[in-house]
Amino acid sequence: MTYLQLAYLHLATVFPAFLIGAYLLFNRKGTPIHKVLGKAYMVLMMFTSLVTLFMSAHVGPTAFNHFGYIHLFSFLVLYLVPTAYFAHAGVISSVIKAV
């Protein structure tokens, strides 16, 4: 895929994630719609973080002539989303859930 195609794919996933995230922050927690939208938000964020890893950095220093500082957010999302999911599911101990 070209960089432009990846950018459009990134926008197509991050824009709905932004809208869903805003809705989830400002509305009542624990409702069935909150749970469904929360899972959709997690899927969108995982997908967009994977897409951004294929987009090379054009600003600032790069590692391996591809990854820039902005890619640290992608790696952070790839770590935090599954961690949050498994913490909520009870797989991860309550000590990590408190963090």
Image (tube, rainbow, N blue to C red):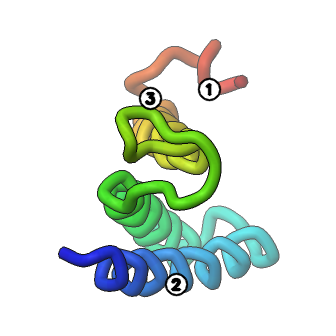
Instruction: Pick the residue in front: 77 or 71.
Output: 71
- On the rendered image, what quadrant is the N terminus found in? bottom left
Query: Which class describes the residues within 10 Å of circle 2: few (<14), some (14-19), or many (20+)?
Result: some
Residue 28 image position (x, y, % from top left): 75, 73
Residue occupied by mark 2: 16
Marks 1 and 2, how far apart at CA: 27 Å
Q: Are marks 1 and 2 in contact (CB under 8 Å)?
A: no
Foreground tag (3 vs 2): 2
Residue occupied by mark 1: 97
Image quarter for residue 25?
Answer: bottom right
Foreground tag (1 vs 2): 2
Please tell me whether mark 3 sits on a helix, a strand or a loop: loop
Residue furthest toward the right? 26
Residue 24 image position (x, y, % from top left): 68, 72
Q: Amino acid at mark 3?
A: Gly
Query: Is 62 situated above or below 20?
Result: above
Image quarter for residue 5?
Answer: bottom left
Instruction: Pick the residue in front: 38 or 68.
Output: 68
The circle on residue 62 is: none
Residue at x 62%, y 26% (from the top left corner)? 97
Q: Earlier in the sequence, mark 1 or mark 2?
A: 2
Q: Are marks 3 and 2 in contact (CB under 8 Å)?
A: no
Residue occupied by mark 3: 90
Q: Earlier in the sequence, mark 1 or mark 3?
A: 3
> In this figure, what is the number of numbered marks?
3
Q: Amino acid at mark 2?
A: Pro
Q: Are marks 1 and 3 in contact (CB under 8 Å)?
A: no
Image quarter for residue 65?
Answer: top left
